[in-house]
Image (spheres, grey):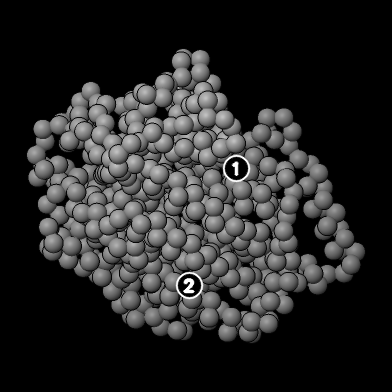
Amino acid sequence: MGHFAVADYVIFAVLLAASMGIGLYHALSGGRQRTTQEFLMADRSMRCLPVSLSLIASFQSAVAIIGVPAEIYTHGTQYWFIGCAYILGLLIPAHVFIPVLYRLRLSSTYQYLEMRFSKAVRICGTLTFIFQTVIYMGLCVYTPAFALNAVTGFELWGAVLATGLVCTLYTTMGGLKAVIWTDVFQTVVMFAGQLAVIVVGVQQTGGVSEVWRKVREGNRISALDLNPDPTERHTFWTLGVGGIFLMLSLYGVNQAQVQRYLSARTEKEAVRSCYMVFPSLQLALALSCVMGLVMFARYCGEDHSDKLGTSSKDAMVVYFVMDMLQGLPGLPGLFIACLFSAALSTISSAFNSLATVTMEDLIKPHFPTMTEARATLLSKVLAMSYGLLCLAMAYLTHLMGDSVLQVALKIFGMVGGPILGLFCLGMFFPWANSTGALAGLGAGLALAFWVGIGSIVTRSSSTRPLPPCRAVLLSDNMTTAIHAALLNVTLSRPSGLKRFYSLSYMWYSAFNCFTVILIGLIISFLTGPMKEEDVTPGTVYPLLGKLLCFLPEHLKKKLCCVTPLGHTVSKTVKFHYRMSNTSETPSDITIPAMK
């Protein structure tokens, strides 16, 4: 493989320098990051365009840029149907989660859990989020470092350190404002890098019609698969319905994303930024999928990853990029810069959100008298500490065998699903109590890890890589034999517990979310459901009241569907924030009534 030319190193260095420069600018301008409000929440002063671009950048990590083309190359375009899940996956957060969370004026999403349930639930929610994010960050740091190592021969762990340290520095210096504005810059670099690879790839493969002919001959254009079997890895249902719950766990209740909404100037701007994410996410998905198809047209499904000294399917994407862009100085550098942009934006968001939840949920309640200067310094130390911890997690990532995309989505499903269930239990079911919430979260996590670890140990997945396009050129008898072999694979499905383990990873979020809600409601009824007057106003969304609007008023009252939100008389409601060791001031918080 060709190594970097001087132009490539220049482009790559410019990306890192620009990211550092933005961090430095925000460290020295405005309030100079002297308050936790500015460092962690960007003074709640952001407009919807930078917030929406930052929301995309946080989600569109290097994992997606390398993982999605590898998925399309190996299994065809079925994965593209996840785009259908983006519609409800963004509409529900915009009209349910954002209004509730924004009006409570929170810094940490998990403050909501204390207001709705108790301090114990808040701490459990926070620790679960920290665990999920630290593991995922390891994956995000490792992926581009692996690519840089393959392309330039640059020492793998040197690249991991470079990524982690640059990111840690600008997050620590510039706070959330730096994170959001570097995200904006990095999103542009990301799209430019992918577009360059696709344009050059199509040109070198012989034009659009030639690419289309080859992918059709190679059976890479997937039809709508309506198979309802939940163990089938990718079908319309697993992607279109299971994907909604995955999106909700990311865009509805994930601290890294919610912190963006809360940094917007007004609730309207926050909702608008959520709407603006939709076309950009569809564009990002389309670019990644088209890149996978161009790759297939170029290599016809053959595996060249061993030329990079690894058996990972994800390495094919790096091989393709270097093969396409060889002899075009600057373009390999642009793609690696694109990968690092995606990684840096995701990692910096995580560092900032980890520092926020640790500060707001675990430290401030125990040290209510801490000065603002000390709290800000501690937030910066926390952001840096998490940066170093994620470098350690990167080492564990390269020990896992799955594709990076599948590992990432498994992590979100196994840990994000139960957190989503916990928030849904609090927001939609007024009678759920804190005992039920804790029992539900515990049961959800236990089941999630049982299925997740079971699937890793037994390597259960009904994955059938499609044959390379050379199979199409074989004789009819040979083709029939290949189809018969594939049919045998399909028929020899696992049974019993192994079948349970082979549940599609796209269903993890939904399965774990419903487990938390079901167990939470059962335990709440057994231990005495929460009375309507005990529920903190503004913490329940009147979903059941809207769904059961046909019932008479007295029956709705019995079912506790008329929540305190419907009972607000004035424009604002004052309530006492129930805390044993309060850190928030004032303890009487004013919330606009939800109409």
Mark 1: which amino acid?
A: Trp
Q: Residues within 10 Å of mark 2 (few under 14, many from 20)?
A: many
The numbered disc on residue 234 is: none
Question: Among all residues in the image, which is located at the extreme right?
Answer: 477
The residue wearing badge 2 is: 194
User: Under tag 1, what secondary structure?
Assistant: helix
Please tell me which residue is depicted at 11% across the width and 43% down the height of the picture.
372
Going 73% across and 61% down the picture, which residue do you hit? 223
User: Mark 2 or 1 closer to N-term?
Assistant: 2
Residue 571, given in percent of the width and then of the height, sits at 30, 42
Label 2's element?
helix
Nearest the eye: 52 or 460: 52
Residue pointed to by mark 1? 507
Position in image of residue 463 (x %, y %): 68, 50
Q: Nearer the viewer, residue 440 or 128?
A: 440
User: What is the CA distance from the residue labelled 2 to the residue labelled 1?
Assistant: 29 Å
Residue type for callout 2: Gln
Q: Nearer the viewer, residue 326 or 508?
A: 508
**Which residue is at a point 46% across and 14% down the rendered structure image?**
527
Q: Position of residue 110 (x, y in %)?
A: 34, 37
Q: Quadrant of residue 587?
A: top left
Tell me if residue 265 can be seen: yes
Q: Residue at x 27, y 26 (%)?
A: 578
Residues 451 and 522: in front is: 522
Give the quarter of the figure containing the C terminus: top left
> Is 219 placed left or right of 390 in the picture?
right
